[in-house]
Amino acid sequence: MSIFPELTADEAAALFEDGMTVGLSAFTAAGAVKAVPRALAARARERHAAGEAFRVRLLTGASTGPTIDDALAEADAISWRAPFQSSAPLRRAINEQRTEFIDMHLSHLPQMIEAGFVPELDVAVVEAVDVTRDGRVFLSTSVGASPSFLRHAKMVIVELNAYHPPRVAEMHDIAVLPPPPRRNPIPISHAMARIGTPFATVDPKKIVGVVRTDEPDEVSDFDPPATSSLQIAGHVADFLVREMRAGRVPDELLPLQAGVGNVSNAVMSAIGADDRLPPFCMFSEVFQDSLVPLMRAGQLTGASTTSLTVSNRVLREIYDDFDFFAPRIVMRPQELSNNPGLIRRLGVIAINTALEVDIYGNANSTHVCGTRLMNGIGGSGDFVRNAFLSILVCPSIAKDGAISTVVPMVSHCDHTDHSVQVIVTEQGCADLRGLGPRQRARTIIDQCAHPMYRDYLHRYLEAAPMGHMPHDLGRCFELHRNLLEHGHMLPGGGTST
């Protein structure tokens, strides 16, 4: 029996009221609470059926599993959301302006909570493997922003999930930064250095109850990599080999970071399989499926992250061989896993995806045609701006060539040309370091654009008015307008004339 009141999920959901600000544990679907948000969605439907208002303001560490964003968005239960999401139902609500969304750098969220820059938290619900009488909370497969939720929520509910073994806490290294101006340097000088405790803390008086569950995370199996992803991965590996041979990257490589998704999985697999590259460590925000075989093979020596974003099959493999994996994986709060100072200190090589890039190296990671949100900036901004080497990857075309991901001007800018150093598509690699705007443009067009779009982009560049960064403001969004009006970016539906 728990030392705290035992609640059913429905009893826990009954504690929520319309307009509350809620913090739920999740960084991707890893460590996401499950039973309480499902019950909360049901409560919202009941209240709506009775003609009553019921919507909450929702914070999580990052994106979530279906039991949070999908369930609550489908129940029209989210009025305000931050800092990131990847849910189709919630995306529709945001783009239809039924839900207000605050797109936010993930490293900023804990400080925003600590400083009171976001609404005061009424309730926090976190998934854990244990909670003690004195308020030590041993989290499950992610840390994210849960330590800050626990510190600042007025009321706390703990989902104790028996699916995850108590030993998962051995991977956790939890520390909360003090407020400025008295912050000492963070004593992490290696990706695997530990500075904190295996538990988060909460005032036990705030814990109103425990809800017991026994469910795996909702991380899906990743799709087999597409041909374009494998080609991108090969170009990234070739680039790193060239950097090492040129002496610009040390022989032992540098810590790597990769965003979440199929392209990132393919890139990490290719880097790990390339015998020209030495064993390496990671300083990242997610630990994904492709990293497990690399760790077993000794190619990945260790990984710092904030979540185990792995499929259930791979998570079971980790749990079944915990003695091997526990010393090699460290999970930290996102304020540390995405910390700009640590990224720069450690010299991280960052590999992130973009929706589109323009000919000068600006990148759009978030909005389709500049207006429709896809997921959000997530942690990419933390790493792109502060990495020793910042690499952005994307296929050169989408929808069978109807869309070029290389355009004259991005329709929304998340990462400026000041931060983006290398762009890679399946066509090739554009190293932009030390190049002026026109040189950058020609390099991106020749190395990264799909052949069907190269003539158009070159003609745009040559016809643009003079200036430091030449643009024709009457034509810079012509490709986007063509797509919206005709379904294909190129005039004539595929010809470059």
Image (spheres, rainbow, N blue to C red):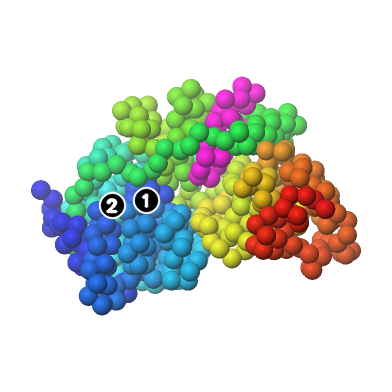
Please provide percent x and percent y for residue 270: 58, 30
Q: Is residue 20 above or below residue 478?
A: below
Q: Earlier in the sequence, mark 2 or mark 1?
A: 2
Residue in front for this viewpoint, 302 or 31: 31
Asked if residue 133 is among those painted magenta in the image, a careful observer would answer no
Which amino acid is tagged 2? Lys
Q: Secondary structure at mark 1?
A: loop
Q: Which mark is residue 432?
A: none
Left or right of 377 on screen, residue 21: left
**Nearer the observer, 162 or 249:** 162
Task: Name the residue carrying label 1.
Answer: 65
Q: Is residue 385 left or right of residue 427?
A: left
Query: How would you rate the neighbour count of disc 1 (Cα within 10 Å): few for under 14, some for 14-19, many for 20 or more?
Result: many
In space, the residues marked 2 and 1 are separated at their CA atoms by 8 Å
The quadrant in which residue 381 appears is bottom right
Question: Which segment is the magenta one?
Answer: 253-282
Q: In front: 164, or 72?
A: 72
Q: Going 67% across and 60% down the picture, which residue do you hit?
A: 486
Q: Which residue is mark 2?
A: 34
In magenta stretch: residue 262? yes
Q: Quadrant of residue 487?
A: bottom right
Amino acid type assigned to the residue bearing label 1 in the image:
Gly
As helix, strand or loop, the secondary structure at mark 2 comes to loop
Residue 447 shows in the view: yes
Q: Position of residue 480 (x, y in %)?
A: 69, 60
Name the residue at 74% across, 62% down. Answer: 478
Residue drawn at the location 13% of the way across and 55% of the way down: 6
- Where residue 80 appears, as percent x and y from the top left, is 41, 69
